[in-house]
Image: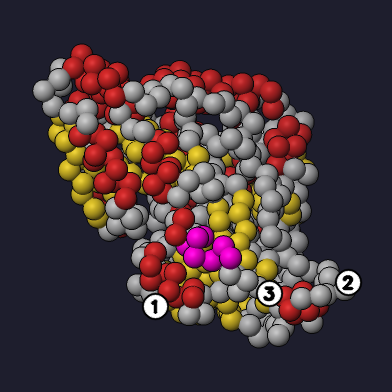
């Protein structure tokens, strides 16, 4: 069933935008191969292949139960760890460690039947493992970054080794979707390994090696309970510098390359040695405002900061609309509750100056921007210049991502913050006054709660549309850019995702054509 259909029928899933994906090639080779690439595909996959994937953001830890950051989900979910259900490339929720659940008429009880999977040590995945994993997520002392997504979970029981029953305290249109994320990851009960540097998953790959500051290597689990991977090894190489990454691609060190800038596309667009794929994304570059801090408590200041920035100009210098688009709130155009809100706080320097003057900052305002060093300085430099034109002096504080997680995400010790949010349904975070924006709106909290408990798609979508508009009108942040997922690969390398690769890079279907 599609994810949107699941929302309506099961009243328990949230949506992931459906999009195209370069899924597994399977056995479907061209009937009459005429070029070298098609001929290679026709010869079948090279089961001994090692594939090197270029990524940007390296995890600070591999402990998916404790450490925040999309870098963990990006490589671990679907590859190392699995959930009871999973989201497919086309936006569908399907079976994984369990069959799709039976849902009670009141939408409060989900019964899962396990599929007989095994962990990497060969032991069976049992209902006790699932209960243990879910209980740890909702425990009072849990620090799981996805704990909030299980807020409706009242009780988890394991009536036998193959059955899991989850009782909810209220209807929850996001529950099934939460099961596809890190909260739903099933870990082995009683395992004593250090999750910060090792794993105890059930996925198609095992962790082989982590060279900190350089790469993480997975190898195929030859005893995998499901369909075995068609490559022997995956090496994730972390190369933040765009020039260095492009050089690595050109010299053959990289097989699959996640694109961050227009220069990379320009360099390969006419080169038959590479293929380029593109798909939708939930990646939104958010300029977060600390709504609890000093002048940023005043909505006039926040609206002024939004109106001061020419988003069209920023998109142009970053590579144009092949890579980015404008967005007026924290919603992707692929979401059914999307509404074009870009007219709110549209670029207007005179309006920005007046708002600042009305707020008592006509003679100037000093603010600090904290930004992780994984991003090129172009955006921060652009913001600095744009704000200077309206009398705002911006001090840019570039930090390691681990420092950003501690200083901004955990402690909200900042004025402005720039970071790319890649996870779907981040709109729901605006209902949490403790989230790092420190945005507190009773309306948003009420409507979000009602949307989660909605009885049908139309009710849910209408409520989330109200949330998105209210958020845009309150300006707790500025949404600078909506990114697209673009990937460069060598010919013959297929089966990698091309949508939302920043949040999930499921390589279970990866294969390399035999040469």
Q: Can residue 54 be seen in this view?
A: yes
Residue 16: which quarter of the image?
top right
- Pointer 2: what residue? 31
Looking at the picture, tell me which residue is in the foreground, 369 or 350: 350
Which residue is pictured at 77% across the width and 31% down the height?
105
Residue 43 position within the rendered picture, expressed as x and y whole percent measured from the top left: 79, 82
Which residue is pictured at 33% across the width and 32% down the height?
309
Q: Estimate the spatial distance between the alpha carbons at disc 1 and disc 2, rounded to whole Å.
A: 43 Å
- Badge 2 crowding class, 10 Å Cα cut-off, few under 14, some 14 to 19, many 20 or more, is few
Looking at the picture, tell me which residue is in the foreground, 154 or 446: 446
Vertical relation: 413 (above or below) 499: above
Q: Are marks 2 and 3 in contact (CB under 8 Å)?
A: no
Vertical relation: 324 (above or below) 58: above
Q: How many numbered callouts?
A: 3
- Pointer 1: what residue? 211
Closer mark to the observer between disc 3 and disc 1: 3
- In the rendered image, residue 168 lying in the magenta stretch gets the answer no
Q: Do the residues labelled 1 and 2 touch (CB within 8 Å)?
A: no
Q: Are marks 3 and 1 in contact (CB under 8 Å)?
A: no
Element marked by disc 1: strand
Q: Is residue 438 visible?
A: no
Direction left: furthest residue: 363
Q: Which residues are the magenta region? A: 264-270
- Pointer 3: what residue? 492
Residue 353 position within the rendered picture, expressed as x and y whole percent measured from the top left: 23, 21
């Amino acid at each position: 069933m599609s994810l949107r259909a699941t929302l309506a029928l099961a009243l328990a899933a949230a949506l992931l935008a459906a999009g195209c994906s370069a899924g597994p090639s399977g056995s479907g080779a061209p009937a009459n191969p005429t070029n070298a690439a098609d001929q290679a595909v026709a010869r079948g996959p090279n089961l001994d292949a090692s594939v090197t994937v270029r990524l940007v953001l390296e995890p600070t830890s591999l402990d998916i139960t404790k450490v925040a950051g999309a870098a963990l989900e990006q490589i671990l979910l679907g590859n190392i760890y699995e959930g009871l259900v999973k989201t497919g490339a086309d936006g569908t929720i399907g079976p994984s460690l369990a069959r799709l659940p039976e849902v009670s008429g009141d939408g409060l009880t989900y019964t899962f039947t396990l599929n007989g999977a095994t962990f990497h040590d060969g032991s069976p995945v049992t209902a006790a493992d699932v209960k243990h994993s879910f209980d740890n997520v909702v425990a009072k002392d849990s620090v799981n970054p996805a704990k909030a997504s299980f807020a409706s979970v009242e009780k988890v029981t394991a009536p036998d080794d193959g059955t899991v029953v989850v009782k909810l305290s209220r209807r929850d249109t996001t529950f099934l979707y939460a099961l596809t994320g890190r909260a739903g990851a099933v870990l082995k009960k009683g395992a004593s390994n250090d999750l910060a540097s090792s794993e105890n998953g059930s996925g198609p790959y095992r962790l082989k090696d982590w060279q900190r500051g350089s790469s993480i290597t997975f190898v195929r689990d030859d005893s995998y309970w499901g369909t075995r991977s068609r490559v022997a090894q995956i090496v994730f190489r972390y190369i933040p510098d765009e020039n260095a990454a492009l050089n690595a691609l050109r010299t053959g060190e990289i097989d699959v390359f996640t694109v961050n800038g227009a220069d990379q596309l320009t360099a390969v667009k006419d080169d038959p040695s590479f293929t380029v794929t593109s798909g939708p994304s939930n990646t939104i570059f958010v300029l977060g405002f600390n709504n609890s801090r000093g002048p940023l408590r005043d909505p006039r200041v926040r609206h002024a900061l939004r109106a001061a920035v020419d988003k069209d100009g920023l998109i142009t210098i970053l590579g144009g609309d092949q890579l980015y688009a404008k967005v007026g709130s924290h919603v992707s155009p692929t979401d059914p509750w999307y509404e074009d809100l870009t007219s709110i706080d549209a670029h207007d320097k005179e309006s920005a100056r007046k708002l600042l003057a009305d707020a008592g900052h006509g003679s100037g305002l000093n603010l600090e921007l904290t930004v992780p060093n994984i991003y090129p300085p172009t955006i921060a430099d652009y913001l600095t210049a744009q704000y200077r034109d309206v009398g705002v002096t911006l001090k840019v504080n570039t930090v390691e991502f681990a420092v950003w997680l501690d200083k901004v995400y955990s402690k909200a010790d900042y004025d402005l913050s720039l970071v790319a949010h890649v996870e779907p349904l981040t709109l729901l975070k605006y209902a949490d006054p403790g989230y790092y924006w420190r945005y507190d709106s009773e309306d948003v909290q009420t409507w979000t709660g009602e949307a989660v408990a909605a009885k049908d798609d139309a009710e849910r979508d209408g409520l989330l549309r109200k949330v998105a508009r209210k958020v845009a009108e309150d300006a707790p942040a500025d949404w600078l850019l909506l990114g697209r997922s673009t990937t460069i690969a060598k010919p013959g390398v297929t089966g990698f995702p091309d949508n939302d690769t920043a949040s999930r890079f499921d390589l279970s279907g990866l294969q390399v054509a035999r040469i």
